[in-house]
Amino acid sequence: MQEFDVIICGAGPAGSTCALGLFNSGLKVALIDKDSFPREKICGDAYGGYSFKILNTISPAFGKKLLELKDGLVAKRAKLISPKGHVVEIKLKGFFANLPRVIFDDFLLNMVKEETTTTIFENTAIQKIDVSNEQVLVKTSLGKVLKAKVIIGCDGSHSIVQSALTHTRELITDTCPGLRAYYKNVKNVEADCLEIHLLSQIPKGYFWIFPSTNGLANVGIGCDKEVLTKHKINLRASFNHIIQNISPFKERFVEAELVGDIKGWTIPIGYFNSKLPISGTRILLCGDAAALVDPSTGEGIGPAMSSGRYAAQFIKICFEENNFSAIFMKGYEKLIRKKYYRNYFLKTSITALYYKFPFLMNWAIYLIANWPLKKNNIHK
Ligand SMILES: Cc1cc2nc3c(=O)[nH]c(=O)nc-3n(C[C@H](O)[C@H](O)[C@H](O)COP(=O)(O)OP(=O)(O)OC[C@H]3O[C@@H](n4cnc5c(N)ncnc54)[C@H](O)[C@@H]3O)c2cc1C
């Protein structure tokens, strides 16, 4: 049986960042993913400003590598468009990029391979997890059993590590199904601008058009699951309806060609609305496994990387103190709550308010768009 100090399940942004965060810890780390990389991930592919900051905080050399990554586009502006068509344009500061996840996630994992001594298992799914007070045992799809002192669940929205911790997935109450497709020949896509459209067809949801590499556009839609059920909305039908029948999209998509398929996945935003624990004896959860996606923007890459870094920091303390008890590991949960709670609570409340009183959305965006003092940062 192979033995490790830390097993990280999942090599997406959370898992790779966590492994990078442990680069100088002296711990024996295994990073395990069910896929082999490069692998596709259904996503809008938009990276918030703090992906760079997180890597740079772990090591300036890691931040530098990200800046040297030439494949992506740099987004300098975002447009938020209200159901009535009012537009607020926001200047984006810092590192905002649009880069297919097939490239970005592979880049992060390669950095783990080059810069750390992590043992990487690709094409290896974790199938069973047994946690006791003394150890963690995992059984993999290759029939191996691996032993560790702690396991970090970075395995996304259908996390097996989360199931091992909570014994149910039902605690995540707030999820947002999303669809993503790549198109060529969409008209008027600006190479440095992210477009987020709030549409009456998808209350408590959004439709996006993001510029992507090779002249493609990443186009997608996401909507709160409860709202979809309540209003009997079929997300795929709504997506097609919007691009085929609703102005200005039908005009912009008239010559558009779908590249690949329209694919769907879950966006988990439930952490602050649920009783989901994200730590327990010898277990921590990060990123989508902890349902940390921003409730207003659907941004999950930044929170995944940030929680991966926090988990790495916290795990080092656990090993220093030789304490992996549930009570001690709550310290990680406290860190995450401190970082996100106020911000996410506010955003969840605002989103709920807009859903209840949709005219507020139009009104607020109209007012901001016409606010004279803000012209430097927010344009009509
Ligand atoms: C349609 C859509 C659009 C989105 N758009 C954006 C966007 O534009 N910007 C943004 O910031 N966020 C966006 N998100 C959210 C973002 O994709 C996620 O928040 C982010 O990928 C979370 O990273 P993660 O590392 O936690 O999980 P993931 O990226 O899901 O990685 C999890 C990894 O775990 C592996 N895994 C799973 N189970 C096992 C197992 N049993 N054993 C071993 N490995 C396993 C998987 O193969 C995967 O590689 C979007 C999400 C969706 C669905």
Image (cartoon, helix red, strand yellow):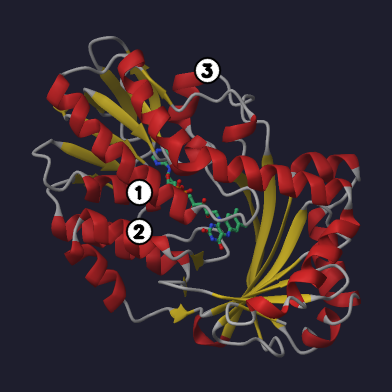
Q: Secondary structure at mark 3?
A: loop
Residue named by callout 1: 11
| Picture coordinates of residue 103, whole percent (x, y) | 39, 69
Q: Is residue 169 visible?
A: yes
Q: Residue at x 50, y 58 (%)?
A: 41
Q: Are marks 2 and 1 in contact (CB under 8 Å)?
A: yes
Specify the quadrant that holds the N terminus: top left
- Residue topped by disc 2: 37
Asked if the beta carbon under badge 1 is closer than 8 A to the nearest atom of ligand 1, the reply is yes
Q: Residues within 10 Å of mark 2 (few under 14, many from 20)?
A: some
User: What residue is drawn where x is 52% and y is 17%?
Assistant: 167
Residue 46, given in percent of the width and then of the height, sits at: 52, 67
- First in sequence: mark 1 vs mark 3: 1
Can residue 33 be spotted in the picture? no
Q: Amino acid at mark 1?
A: Ala
- Secondary structure of the residue carrying tag 1 is loop
Rendered image quadrant of residue 78: bottom right
Which tag, 2 or 1, sits closer to the chain's start? Answer: 1
Which mark's residue is nearer the viewer, 2 or 1? 1
Q: Residue 167, which numbered label?
A: 3
Nearest the eye: 129 or 81: 81
Which residue appears farthest toward the top when viewing the image?
133
Q: What amino acid is found at the position of numbered circle 2 in the picture? A: Phe
Identify the secondary structure beneath mark 2. Answer: loop
